[in-house]
């Protein structure tokens, strides 16, 4: 086998390796985004069930009645400022909480709601998840989730 054949095989192996790695990363990304479908319809109390910590209460300080929009943000998030501008367009009577994943409360709630991608918007109605949006969402999708016409994004 000559030099060019060996070079061709080496380049082919590198290309296949990079393609496999990219496919794996895409699969993991899609798996993280699939939480949106699983989370809609769950109650916050269902998420608090920790089998290994019996009797331990996790304080989350969310109202039991009403509509709340949780907006998770973090450092280096390029879409977070755009998402924040979009959420400011929501009606003023709707409670929007901006949670930085670097703070203690933000970390706890991000772990509770399985936040893996920033920005993430979780829409709660009477402590039930009615909308779970990863990456960017519009105010119309949030309002549709609250009225029951839209479920996920």
Image (tube, grey):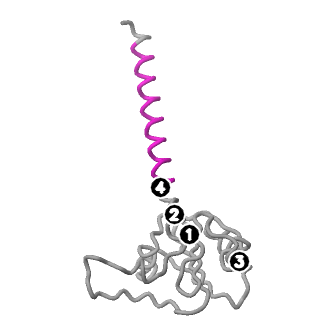
In this rendered view, identify the residue nearer to me: 111 or 48.
48
In this rendered view, identify the residue nearer to me: 94 or 3.
94
Residue 136: % across, % down: 64, 65
Q: Which residues are magenta?
A: 6-30
Residues marked 3 and 1 touching at CB (< 8 Å): no
Real-space Cα distance between discs 4 and 1? 15 Å
Residue located beneath label 2 in the image: 117
From the viewer's perspective, is the residue at label 4 or at label 1 nearer?
4
Q: Quadrant of the C terminus?
A: bottom right
Instruction: Indicate which disc, 4 or 1, sits on the residue closer to the N terminus.
Output: 4
Real-space Cα distance between discs 3 and 2? 21 Å
Main SS of the magenta part reads: helix
Residue located beneath label 1 in the image: 120
In this rendered view, identify the residue nearer to me: 86 or 45.
45
Residue density around tag 3, few if under 14, some if 14–19, many if 20 or more, within 10 Å: some
Residue located beneath label 4 in the image: 31
Residue 107: % across, % down: 42, 76
Assign a secondary structure to mark 1.
Answer: strand
Residue 151: % across, % down: 63, 69
Residues marked 2 and 1 touching at CB (< 8 Å): yes
Real-space Cα distance between discs 2 and 4? 11 Å
Real-space Cα distance between discs 3 and 1? 16 Å
From the viewer's perspective, is the residue at label 3 or at label 1 nearer?
3
Instruction: Indicate which disc, 4 or 3, sits on the residue closer to the N terminus.
Output: 4
Q: Is residue 9 a member of the stretch shown in magenta?
A: yes
Residue furthest to the top in view is 1
């Amino acid at each position: 086998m000559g030099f060019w054949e060996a070079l061709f095989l080496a380049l082919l192996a590198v290309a296949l390796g990079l393609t496999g790695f990219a496919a794996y990363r895409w699969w993991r990304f899609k798996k993280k985004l699939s939480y949106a479908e699983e989370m809609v319809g769950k109650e916050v109390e269902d998420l608090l069930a920790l089998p290994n910590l019996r009797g331990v209460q996790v304080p989350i300080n969310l109202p039991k009645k009403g509509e709340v929009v949780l907006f998770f943000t973090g450092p280096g998030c390029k879409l977070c400022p755009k998402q924040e501008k979009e959420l400011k367009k929501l009606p003023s009577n709707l409670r929007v909480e901006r949670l930085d994943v670097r703070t203690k409360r933000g970390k706890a709630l991000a772990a509770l709601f399985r936040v893996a991608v920033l920005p993430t918007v979780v829409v709660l109605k009477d402590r039930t998840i009615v909308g779970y949006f990863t990456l960017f969402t519009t105010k119309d999708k949030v309002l549709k989730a609250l009225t029951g016409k839209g479920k996920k994004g």
